[in-house]
Image (spheres, rainbow, N blue to C red):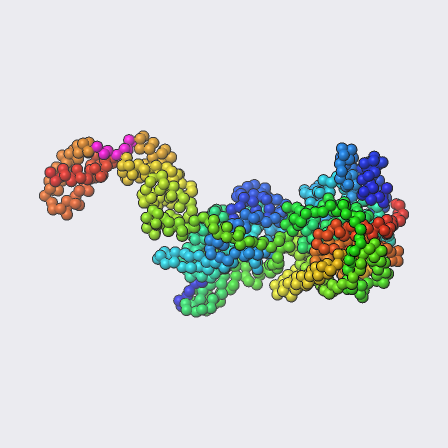
Amino acid sequence: MVDQSIASLAQKLRAKEISSVELTQDYLARIKQLDGQLNSFITVTDEVALAQAEAADKLIAAGSTSALAGIPIAHKDLFCTDGVLTTCASKMLHNFVPPYESTVTGRMLASGVVTLGKTNMDEFAMGSSNENSYYGAVKNPWNLEKVPGGSSGGSAAAVAAGLCVAATGTDTGGSIRQPASFCGISGLKPTYGRVSRFGMIAYASSLDQAGPMARSAEDCAHILQSIAGFDGNDSTCSEVAIEDYTANLDAPLDGLTIGLPKEYFGDGLNNDVATVIQDAVKEFEKLGAKVKEISLPNLNLSIPSYYVIAPSEASSNLSRFDGVRYGYRCEEPKDLMDMYKRSRGEGFGKEVQKRIMVGTYALSEGYYDAYYLKAQRIRRLIKEDFVNALAEVDVIMGPVAPTTAFGIGAKTDDPIAMYLEDIYTLSINLAGIPAMSIPAGFADGMPVGLQIMGNYFAEAKLLNVAHKFQQATDWHTKNPSLAEGA
Amino acid sequence: MNWEVVIGLEIHAQLSTQSKLFSGAATSFGAEPNTNTTLVDLGMPGALPVFNKEALRMAVMFGSAVNAEIGMTSVFARKNYFYPDLPKGYQTSQMDHPIVGKGFLDITLDDGTVKRVGITRAHLEEDAGKSLHEDFHGMTGIDLNRSSTPLLEIVSEPDMRSAKEAVAYVKMIHSIVTYLGICDGNMAEGSMRCDINISLRPKGQEEFGTRTEIKNVNSFRFIERAIYTEIERQADILEDGGKIVQETRLYDPDKDETRSMRSKEDANDYRYFPCPDLLPIELTQEYVDDIAANLPELPMQKAERFMSEYKLSEYDAGVLSATRAMADYFEEVAKAAGNAKLAANWVMGELSKYLNTEGKEITESNVSAEQLGGLLVRIGDNTINGNTAKSVLQAMWEGQGSADEIIEAKGLKQVTDTGAIEAMIQGVIEANAAQVEQFRASDEDKQKKMIGFFMGQVMKASQGKANPGVVTPILNKLLKG
């Protein structure tokens, strides 16, 4: 039952083959059995989940048509959940129980989901390996020696291991797509502004976007349907009307033009990963698509641009964690300055402190023009590259990451190598366009994700393209084998 | 040496919106600590600002009223610094692209000359909360009710050359924002606060001297005194060959001195950058034109109208239009009394005496405009004379009722019956035979001086109720025999 899609589970729930309570009990039992190896959950909310499941069973009996009713899911632990611990995987928020609900989790509750718990992540969503968590590293269910990717590594590992049907993630520079790629699941980063950021603890406000992580593009579509759309509580949330994301999943791909950016296939890309991507593109050609080489000339500038803009915003966004009103406060502060310094010094992990310092530096008087303003100009160039490319092609494809999941600890001492992991994903956030990662094969026994990028608000098109591929292939149905109770 | 003072002002006016700049919390003053707050004002994780369009409208109104360029694209920026009552660790303000750009306004000085003062800019920003140090046993309490309250920071050019000019400018800004209804102008509650930049330079020198900034002065009187004090302090230093340190100072009204808060070296690097949680504000010309076309009457315009419509003197028109509340009060009295000139005299004269004695604003007057108008009607129709009216007003001020009730109750109705008055005058003449004889023996000039004595006697006999207009001709006739 644990490798079923949302659509098939929804059908079984309505056919009374299983109840949501039974389904929820199955998943809770699986978490208990398996998550000791993975560490994908920070908080498991058994009681809340079972109460929600009971309510969902009643909803379904009463004729609810919501595809998500009674479906057990999990949320990345940076979505504020009313009455449920929300840590951002940080000591800073180890005791923070929000008295409010984020728009994303609130909308999913309204769709009748069952929330199993909150998933592990890189602290404050800063990282590409899920090694930066106050609650410990998350392991990749395909190989426990390897990282699941980050920052939504807990969500990716949990979905891949069948500990939940689907999960939410957030993506600031690849944090949905890269862990989806590393763990062999489907993940969608929507257009910036498609999904409300209200109640999502901010990392870099102009880049952060929430999205679904699930077993298939179709499952992603069901979740996006629930969470997307205008929200008056987020001024950057778009008023562009949402589409019916499942209606055109099966639309044929005849005549689809795929752009392959030559910069995505250059130095640094692992050969085996390249082969998987090329094979996937051939599959699309079989489905009637045409391929065109394109260029995104400023791609190499996306890393420096991102690592100025994101830390700059983060340095300001994380100022509110000062030990005054909530969260961690150091013991026995001597005075105000001591309270600030020790609360923040003890409450934030190393990577978070590093990015706060980088951002503070970049925004400082005398450096602002050279760093922040220049990074913003580069951002515009990167955006123009995508706008120009997407005027010629329908979607852009390429790898999500240069390699498959790397070993735990392999890159922790080499921040530049770690930052290079994000070379194919960062530019999408800088441009604000939507992109997906879907399983496209394996290299060295580890999953490889194909990245599909589209135009602003073209989520339905991306999901359609991804779904057709998943109809023609079975990569997304592969499951890691985990020894129970190990 | 002969020093010239150069003054520029930054005025923070709290906009009188119902809700806060970036949240739906109420802005009302005096609520229980931390009750007028939402997730946004408390700086909770994941809370996001939503811009209050009413504050935008008010800022554009101000810009139109001071002849300023309106920023058709304005941008909110974050001013980053740590302070316990600044919940987000940054203040959302405007930096490079303010909503109001260059403008100007004219102030009238005591000698009647008009001076133009440049407005550099005015921008929208949110207020911080308050740190409370009492009642917390050595700890600090934080009240975030004021957090995210909308402020318009109005920055002037360094165009003022005296404390008087500075005060005239602040009064004009006060007058404009209250006329526009965008700020209640209540300085005691902090609705308008003033930062004063002051420097001295030898008269004739073009270059500015080093300035100091006096923070958060909150009354017209303190502004004037703080400036005098600071001029003296700076002049003393310069006369002794010293140098002014660029710094922020605080004015202590109890000691009438300014003292250093922090020097330029200690100044924060605020690391301004555009707020990524708020989109730039884009205005249409239509929106701006519509606001400009529908501005309420401003103080200068009102003064001119008072002069042309009510034939008031320039001085009277200026006083009565100084605040919107005063102007509204006056116009209501004038309407009720049917006599603008009389209304002007009474509002500026008798009524102001009572207000000043009790330190009250016109809005707090014990006597409403309608009631005062009712009193003036009774002067106009000769029911009472001016002197009696003064005592009636006193009774009204003390809450004894309306003018008519008091006149009735005290029997103050004026006597205009010529027969009764003639009898009274006859009585006075008989009782003062010696003075009458002296009067009749005097020349005309002397007589004019003496008539006041008899007038007084008649008024006394009538207990002040005789109509002087009726008394005078009869008295003259009977005295001359």
Q: Is residue B142 magenta?
A: no
Which residue sits at x=76%, y=45%?
A247
Q: Residue furthest front?
A: A255
Q: Nearer the viewer, residue B278 or B171?
A: B278
Magenta span: chief secondary structure: loop
Q: Is the residue B438 above or below the residue A90 in the image?
A: above
Q: Is residue B412 magenta?
A: yes
Q: Quadrant of residue A48?
A: top right
Residue A354: percent from the left, percent from the top? 71, 59
Specify whether residue B282 is in view: yes
Quadrant of the frame with the N terminus of chain A: top right
- The x, y position of residue B296, in whole percent, is 45, 48
Q: Nearer the viewer, residue A65 or B90?
A: A65
On screen, residue A271 versus residue B171, left or right, reads right
Residue A309 % position (x, y): 68, 59
**Left or right relative to A395: residue B39:** left
Residue segment shown in magenta: B410-417
Q: From the viewer's side, name the closer residue of B272 and A402.
A: A402
**Measuring 34% from the left and 35% from the top, which residue is drawn there?**
B403
* Vertical placement of residue A373 versus B129, above or below: below
In which quarter of the view is residue B168 placed? Answer: bottom left
| x then y, percent, for residue A132 | 76, 55
In this rendering, the answer to whether A419 lies above or below A196 is below
Q: Is residue B395 visible?
A: no
Q: Residue at x 32, y 42 (%)?
A: B339
Residue at horizontal 54 percent and vertical 59 percent from the top: B262
